Amino acid sequence: MKAALLALLLLFPVAAHGATTEEIFALYARGDYEQAVKAGEAARTAPGYAIAARAVLADKVLRDKPCLECLTRAEKLARQAVAADPRHAFGQIWLAVSLGYQSRITGVVKARLRDAPGQSKIALDAAIAADPKNSFAISALGGWHIEIVRGGGAYLARLLYGAAEAEALVLFDRAVKLAPANVAVHYQIALSLLGFDADKYRARILAELRAAIAGEAATSYETAMQGRTNELLGLVTSGAPDVLDAKVRTFQGYTD
């Protein structure tokens, strides 16, 4: 059924006005990101805005170059999704993700001044409260814990934000248990741990990378992520730590 819908959309692009959530997602899934954004905005629904935000983020990630303007656009769309329905989990998720990527460009000081870490935590908690089995939200919250600990150290991370390395691992375990074949979840967990401590978590990273490669890509974005996964796996196994570190930072959206 899904394959038939995608084939139909390839032949007859969906008009931006009046597209259903399924049609908007199909545009995103096939990699027609700008069309998905237009359709999502025109729908004026929480799912529509959320898919639009997700499309902007996917496009930004695939560019391989930091784009603060793109991330600000994604944040705006995600906030529109949240305003339309605070209990739509994906609106909250993409809001947190857009804030996280922005923080990597603007730096720690500016991120803390606008309380981006706090806003992200609130958004992810809201997503999980609305959808307790959402593997994207759960793995993203695990990544949030890792990022806070990496940026400020274990003591300050717990003191200021209640973040902890051990909690990240619990959340990662829960996410993969809920979605064992999800390419994006496995990839993001591996990337998060690579940016944190590639030596300490080498076995877990290898397992996540291999699981991401073995999974069936459900979207054009996931197909691209499998390509990145193969690249990372090669660097992890080749023993080139400097090259690996540089590639991880690029994939995570850092400017340096």
Image (tube, rainbow, N blue to C red):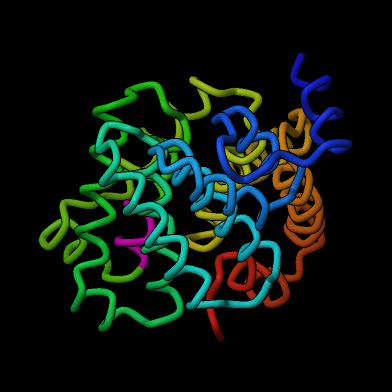
Picture residue at 77% right of the left edge, 62% below the top: 235
Q: Could you say where residue 56 lies in the image, as x and y percent from the top left?
A: 57, 59
Which corner quadrant of the image does residue 161 belong to?
bottom left
Inspect the magenta stretch and tell me whether residue 89 lies in it.
no
Q: Left or right? Give the position of 237 relative to 20.
A: right
Inspect the magenta stretch and tell me whether residue 149 lies in it.
yes
Rendered-image quadrant of the C terminus = bottom right
Q: Could you say where residue 1 lies in the image, as x and y percent from the top left?
A: 77, 13
Q: Could you say where residue 230 lies in the image, as x and y percent from the top left?
A: 81, 51
Task: Give the answer, above or below, for where 241 lies relative to 135.
Answer: below
Which corner quadrant of the image does residue 151 belong to?
bottom left
Picture residue at 26% right of the left edge, 46% below the top: 83
Task: Give the answer, above or below, for where 127 lies relative to 74.
Answer: above
Q: What stretch is highlighted in magenta?
A: 144-150
Q: Left or right? Give the position of 75 relative to 177.
A: left
Q: Could you say where residue 45 lies in the image, as x and y percent from the top left?
A: 40, 38
Picture residue at 36% right of the left edge, 45% below the top: 81
Q: Left or right? Give the position of 227 relative to 56.
A: right
Q: Left or right? Give the position of 179 relative to 106.
A: right
SS assignment for the magenta stretch, majority: helix
Q: Nearer the viewer, residue 80 or 184?
A: 80
Q: Which of 168 and 84 is in front in this view?
A: 84
Picture residue at 60% right of the left edge, 27% below the top: 22
Which corner quadrant of the image does residue 213 belong to?
top right
Q: Nearer the viewer, residue 244 or 88?
A: 88
Q: Which of 101 and 44 is in front in this view?
A: 44
Task: Give the answer, above or below, for where 103 lies relative to 43.
Answer: below
Q: How many labels does the image show?
A: 0
